[in-house]
Amino acid sequence: MNNLKLIIYSWAPKLYSSFCFINRKSVLLEQLETCLQYGTFVQMTAQRFDSWLILIFLSRIALYANFMVYAACLPILLDKWDMSATQAGSISSAFMFGYAASLFVTAWLSDLFGAKRLFLLSAFLSAFSALLFGFFAHSYLSGLFLYGLAASTQGGLYTPAIMLFSDRYDTSRRGTAVGYLIASTSVGYAFSLVVSGVCLTWGGYRTAFIVTGCLPVIGLGLVCVAKNPQSHSSA
């Protein structure tokens, strides 16, 4: 009996030390796992919100700044340009037909010349045509031609962009990235209405035309600053 007590007393501290070591090791493993999970989260966040995606998102908002300016100014233009309802509707129709046609044409040209080239070219032409409309649209005929011309340059900001996103992002991230692409279009429409409304109140329809005609130039600058897309990038 005395020998049993002696064995228990001699091994008890060792067992206790072992238990503390195992427990401490378990805590350290949990902390390490938490750090690894946090690091993965930070990495995923950085991947999801990479600089190229942000620049393209902002650039498309600016490039669409003149998309809704005619609709916002229409009540005033009916009087200023002495238009009938049919004439006013024909300008909107020219814009929509031009935009729809450009979606198909730029998708086809992207297969021939590359989506990147078409996107850059469309950004340049969109900014240039927005300036033309902003500064030189002063009547029904000039508005009809210049607004239709502006629309025919904007399809290349959409279909080639989808191809660029498909090349840059793998399947695990492509859905989120394309979601931002589509969202930038809707935000651009809303931005165009807000800017047009503010400019109308401040300086009339001419101010709205000029300001929304200049903003796409900023969008073009952001496109030029954006990094070149790389296939299945994880940046």
Image: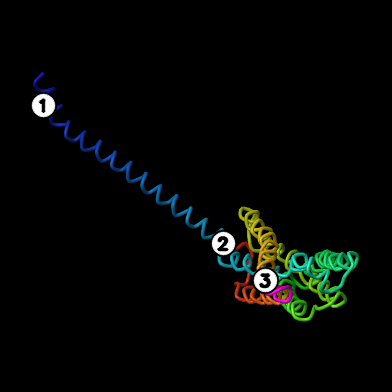
Kind of element beneath mark 2? loop
* Sequence order check, earlier mark of 2 and 1: 1
Question: What mark, if any, has residue 6 been given in the picture?
Answer: 1
* Sequence order check, earlier mark of 3 and 1: 1
Q: Residue at x 62, y 73 (%)?
A: 222
Q: Residue at x 66, y 64 (%)?
A: 194
Q: Residue furthest left?
A: 2
Q: Position of residue 24 (x, y in %)?
A: 28, 42
Which residues make up the magenta segment?
202-208
Q: Rounded to the nearest whole Å, what is the CA distance between mark 2 and mark 1?
A: 63 Å
Q: Is residue 76 above or below residue 135?
A: above
Kind of element beneath mark 3? helix
Disc 2 designates what residue? Answer: 234
Disc 3 designates what residue? Answer: 199
Q: Determine contact: label 2, label 3, CB under 8 Å.
A: no
Q: Determine contact: label 2, label 1, CB under 8 Å.
A: no
Residue 220, located in which quarter of the rendered image?
bottom right
Magenta segment main secondary structure: helix
- Disc 3 residue type (three-letter): Cys
Q: Residue at x 63, y 67 (%)?
A: 56
- Disc 1 residue type (three-letter): Leu
How packed mark 3 is, by other alpha carbons closer than 10 Å (few <14, some 14-19, many 20 or more), is many
Q: Work out which quarter of the rendered image holds the N terminus and state it.
A: top left
Q: Position of residue 185 (x, y in %)?
A: 69, 62
Q: Is residue 161 above or below residue 137?
A: above
